[in-house]
């Protein structure tokens, strides 16, 4: 966000300098202003896409606390939770006896929902990931 504001400020200073120098005609100034505005909007839009979403399905009461990249997740209501997560490699872990055990690893992509279903077979947690 700070980078977008800095880019907006830099574009505004450049545009003001061109106006002061009177290097552009009246029609070109409007075109340059339009181009600068579109550039600022595109930069702001690029910064917005740096998160994705993780939907976690579990069976209530079956597991201990879950962790997403070492951040504890509140127990999912009705066995389902949707969380916002930074883009990149993510590890879903389970705490057993005070030790964090990785259950599965998956990639979170920008503006996408990854569905993770956690189940238990023979008391061992199992993870099914769907993009």
Image: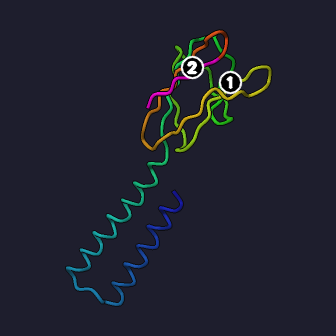
Give left or right: position of 100 versus 87. Answer: right
Residue 46, given in percent of the width and then of the height, sits at 42, 55
Residue 11, given in percent of the width and then of the height, sits at 41, 73
Residue 91 shown in magenta: no
Q: Main secondary structure of the magenta part?
A: strand
Relative vertical location of residue 21 with respect to residue 104 in this rendering, above or below: below
The kind of secondary structure element at disc 2 is strand
From this viewpoint, is residue 81 visible? no
Q: Residue at x 47, y 42 (%)?
A: 109
Q: Are marks 1 and 2 in contact (CB under 8 Å)?
A: yes
Q: Which mark is residue 94?
A: 1
Residue 128 vs residue 44, the one in the foreground: 128
C-alpha separation, residue under disc 1 versus residue under disc 2? 10 Å
From this viewpoint, is residue 84 visible? yes
Residue 29, quarter of the rendered image: bottom left
Q: Residue at x 66, y 34 (%)?
A: 71
Give left or right: position of 94 versus 86. Answer: right
Q: Residue at x 20, y 79 (%)?
A: 27
Q: Which residue is mark 2?
A: 118
Start and end of the magenta stretch?
125-131
Residue 90 vs residue 46, the one in the foreground: 90
Colour scheme of the picture: rainbow
Residue 32 vs residue 63, the one in the foreground: 63
């Amino acid at each position: 966000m700070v980078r977008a504001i800095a880019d907006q400020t830099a574009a505004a200073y450049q545009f003001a300098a061109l106006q002061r120098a009177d290097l552009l005609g009246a029609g070109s100034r409007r075109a340059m202003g339009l181009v600068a505005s579109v550039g600022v909007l595109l930069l702001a839009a690029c910064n917005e896409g740096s998160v994705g979403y993780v939907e976690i399905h579990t069976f209530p009461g079956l597991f201990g606390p879950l962790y997403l990249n070492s951040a504890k997740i509140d127990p999912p209501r009705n066995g389902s939770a949707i969380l916002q997560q930074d883009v990149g490699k993510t590890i879903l872990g389970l705490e057993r006896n005070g030790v964090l055990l990785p259950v599965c690893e998956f990639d979170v992509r920008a503006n996408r929902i990854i569905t993770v279903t956690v189940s238990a077979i023979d008391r061992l947690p199992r993870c099914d990931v769907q993009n």
